[in-house]
Image: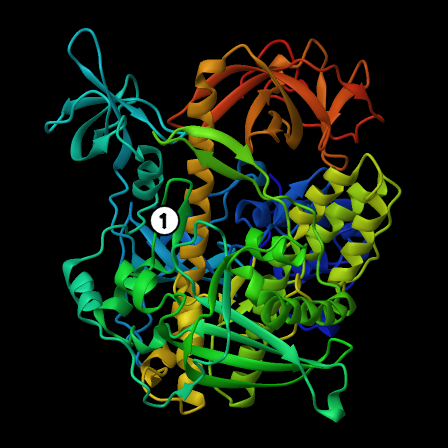
């Protein structure tokens, strides 16, 4: 029986003895700092471990894997991707001491086993914080995540923010009546199975329902009863309703919230400057219903800033109407942000606020917070000031309308605005672009697709809208306004919520470095890479066949942007100070920044309170989670719409691109539709396929033919499951010749490599 390592106290570096197995924390730090030298052999060599101590080392590394602190990649060990600072957890078990253990509710299959998280029940209730929430086995919770300080046990600990009000025994699906009179629940989640319905509670065939799972035996179907009828699947907008209910997105405003919105009165001139004569204009999508930002620019005529420009950005003053702890505020925080589906918007605020009182309508008086920014002719921001104003939009323009005017095609509205408003805006944008080019933010080429629907709510077509200078102008002016907000609040020593984006982890850098090496593209080692380092990689691949795959891999290497009261900068934008300020109608983070500006600059009512400041950490964590919730719901809705759209085209062939490679098969994206499906490895052919993680490829062991991330392929649709948003394909394209796969291939349970042509036990 092999020796089992025992927990040891943390030692200082000078206490570590060469030739002996170091403690867990030292091993973890070495692996994190040396991702390219982290095989068991490398670790043993680094610490001089020989003989029987190698058995102890092997056991300790296995324990670290079991606790989720390490994951194995080929022959090397690495620190797993860190959990987000706030995560939705399912409490699944207890440890030997009776403590609750949870795991992330959502975890990518390709990442292996989800890490364990120790749930801490205590905390909160002091210094203005909320009373602590408690949870039990089987609950789903929203939790703040902390790396574990213990040398034993799970990789993370968590403090409960709230217990999500959704029974974990509940499932969402569609009722299907069978010929024998019985009923089944057809689940909407790909991982779930059918459920036998014992009590329909009035639900009919085709209804979308929520079901309480009462029994799940070892054999046969689980049984359940209908808890609530969401609506008919045949009804309009049913697809987005699936995502809304599946993710628990609040979509019905309580009566007290609607009453508060209706009772709101237009803002007064108290504590406001009168800027109604300034010809600010809104530039938005043609179908936009709310307008929360307006812009204006002019040359700076001062001799000391010759060639410079003055840019004004005005943002709807939501903080005047949505006060801390009000019914409107509680509901806005509960939602966190607006959620955008192809057929509807679930707004953060009622229409009376978002589409009326706070929408910067053309020709109507509206309250706003404005920032006046001065730029030198080199594109450097020289100064800025914030103002609480009353404004009147001179025009409501679409992106296409403004761009057409600049390109020489004016209409009745843009004609009079061309010289006094639009041309100065474009001149200012050109100046700001000089500064942007010098800053060198990350320049990923990832076109965004938009689904256009027919009148009946089904898919008409998927388009890639052109990227106009009008889009870029508004984007750059909003970015600079966000920077100005963060800088002002820091100068005033005012607490705020930043929009932060961390640099790629060392482990992700190493994965990208190994892949780029197969294309002879170098990536410097070290933990201080900047955004322009990745731009250099993208530039080298620009005119090569590898452009798409390199863009994909660089995107995958990036961290996820989050909200935080602690500033670490924004890696992707290459900015040290950045906060969201420009969309308070649809993002709660921006509302917090508005309140902070009002309070710190003494601009009147609606400022940030001391109680809110004490809760900024929790607020930032919650809205980061709600943002991910919205993104998941939006993505799943698109998948379901496309699956519905293609369900009648089984047997047809499509042009696709390999968008993901796993040992189980290939994910194929359909560029024309903005969705993807799966090709199981068992259907690829008679060869044995090796999963080459470095090259992101499946390679035939006998023929050397295979498929790599980014390959253009032709596939045949063999199955579409609209409820789950799932598509399954057969591969029609032959594999291409690839270098021999990296050894240490993945095997089936029988110890044989994954083979096409015959599914193994997986």
For the image shown, how many numbered marks are present on the structure? 1
Q: Could you tell whether 34 is left or right of 162 in the image?
A: right
Instruction: Report the residue at 58% width, 20% height from top.
Output: 680
Instruction: Report the residue at 27% width, 26% height from top.
Output: 234
Q: Nearer the viewer, residue 359 or 21?
A: 359
Q: Nearer the viewer, residue 121 or 278?
A: 278
Q: Relative to 705, say whether 63 is above or below.
A: below
Residue 276, image x, y percentages? 43, 80
Q: Relative to 238, say whether 144 is above or below.
A: below
- SS assignment at label 1: strand
Residue 488, image x, y percentages? 54, 85
Q: Could you tell whether 86 is left or right of 309 in the image?
A: left
Q: Nearer the viewer, residue 749 or 56?
A: 749
- Looking at the rendering, in which quadrant would you find the C terminus? top right
Q: Which residue is mark 1?
A: 345
- Looking at the rendering, in which quadrant would you find the N terminus? top right
Q: Could you tell whether 699 is left or right of 630 in the image?
A: right
Residue 315, image x, y percentages? 45, 72
């Amino acid at each position: 029986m092999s020796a089992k390592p025992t927990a040891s106290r943390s030692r200082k570096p000078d206490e570590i003895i060469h030739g002996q197995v170091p403690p867990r924390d030292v091993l973890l730090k070495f692996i994190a700092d040396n991702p390219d030298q982290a095989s068991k052999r490398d670790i043993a060599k680094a610490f001089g471990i020989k003989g029987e101590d190698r058995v102890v080392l092997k056991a300790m590394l296995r324990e670290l894997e079991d606790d989720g602190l390490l994951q194995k990649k080929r022959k090397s060990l690495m620190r797993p991707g860190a959990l987000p600072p706030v995560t939705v957890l399912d409490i699944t078990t207890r440890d030997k001491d009776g403590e609750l253990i949870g795991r992330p509710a959502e975890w990518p299959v390709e990442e292996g086993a989800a890490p364990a998280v120790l749930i801490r029940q205590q905390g909160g209730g002091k210094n203005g914080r909320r009373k602590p929430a408690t949870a039990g086995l089987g609950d789903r919770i929203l939790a703040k995540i902390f790396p574990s300080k213990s040398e034993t046990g799970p990789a993370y600990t968590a403090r409960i923010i709230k217990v999500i009000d959704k029974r974990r025994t509940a499932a969402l699906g569609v009722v299907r009546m069978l010929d024998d009179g019985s009923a089944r629940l057809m689940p909407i989640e790909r991982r779930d199975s059918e459920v036998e319905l014992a009590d329909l509670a009035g639900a009919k065939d085709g209804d979308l329902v929520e079901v309480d799972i009462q029994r799940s035996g070892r054999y046969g179907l689980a049984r359940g009863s209908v808890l609530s009828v969401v609506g008919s699947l045949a009804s309009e907008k049913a697809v987005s309703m699936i995502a809304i209910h599946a993710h628990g997105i609040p979509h019905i405003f309580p009566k007290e919230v609607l009453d508060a919105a209706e009772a709101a009165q237009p803002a007064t001139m108290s504590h406001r400057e009168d800027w109604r004569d300034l010809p600010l204009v809104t530039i938005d999508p043609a179908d936009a219903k709310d307008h929360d930002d307006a812009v204006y620019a002019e040359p700076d005529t001062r001799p000391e800033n010759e060639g410079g420009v003055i840019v004004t950005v005005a943002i709807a003053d939501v903080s005047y109407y949505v006060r801390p702890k009000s019914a409107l505020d509680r509901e806005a925080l509960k939602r966190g942000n607006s959620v955008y589906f192809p057929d509807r918007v679930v707004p953060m605020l009622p229409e009376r606020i978002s589409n009326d009182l706070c929408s910067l309508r053309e020709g109507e008086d509206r309250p706003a917070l404005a920032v006046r920014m001065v730029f030198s002719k080199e594109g450097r921001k020289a100064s800025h000031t914030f103002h609480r104003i009353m404004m009147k939009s001179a025009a409501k323009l679409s992106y296409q309308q403004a761009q057409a005017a600049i390109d020489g095609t004016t209409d009745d509205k843009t004609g009079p605005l061309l010289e006094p408003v639009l041309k100065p805006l474009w001149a200012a944008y050109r100046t700001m672009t000089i500064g942007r080019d010098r800053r060198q933010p990350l320049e990923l080429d990832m076109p965004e697709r938009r689904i256009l629907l027919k009148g009946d709510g089904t898919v008409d077509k998927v388009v890639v809208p052109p990227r106009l200078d009008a889009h870029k102008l508004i984007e750059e002016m909003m970015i600079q306004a966000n920077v100005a907000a963060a800088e002002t609040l820091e100068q005033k020593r005012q607490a705020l919520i930043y929009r932060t984006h961390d640099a790629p982890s060392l482990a992700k850098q190493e994965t990208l470095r190994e892949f780029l090496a197969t294309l002879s593209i170098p990536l410097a080692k070290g933990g201080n890479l900047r955004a322009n380092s990745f731009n250099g990689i993208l530039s080298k691949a620009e005119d090569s066949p590898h452009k798409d795959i390199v863009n994909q891999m660089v995107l995958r290497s990036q961290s996820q942007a989050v909200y935080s009261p602690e500033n670490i900068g924004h890696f992707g934008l290459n900015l040290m100070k950045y906060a969201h300020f420009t969309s308070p109608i649809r993002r709660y983070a921006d509302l917090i920044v508005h309140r902070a500006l009002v309070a710190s600059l003494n601009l009147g009512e609606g400022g940030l309170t001391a109680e809110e400041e004490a809760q900024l950490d929790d607020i930032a964590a919650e809205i980061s989670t709600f943002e991910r919730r919205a993104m998941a719901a939006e993505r799943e809705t698109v998948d379901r719409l496309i699956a519905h759209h293609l369900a009648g085209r089984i047997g047809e062939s499509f042009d696709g691109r390999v968008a993901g490679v796993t040992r189980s098969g290939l994910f194929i994206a359909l560029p024309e539709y903005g969705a993807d499906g799966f090709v199981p490895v068992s259907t690829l052919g008679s060869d044995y396929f090796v999963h080459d993680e470095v090259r992101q490829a499946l390679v035939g062991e006998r023929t050397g033919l295979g498929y790599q991330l980014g390959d253009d392929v032709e596939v045949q649709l063999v199955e579409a499951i609209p409820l789950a948003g799932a598509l399954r394909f057969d591969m029609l394209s032959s594999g291409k010749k690839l270098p021999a796969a990296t050894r240490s291939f993945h095997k089936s349970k029988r110890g044989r490599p994954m083979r096409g042509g015959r599914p193994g036990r997986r």
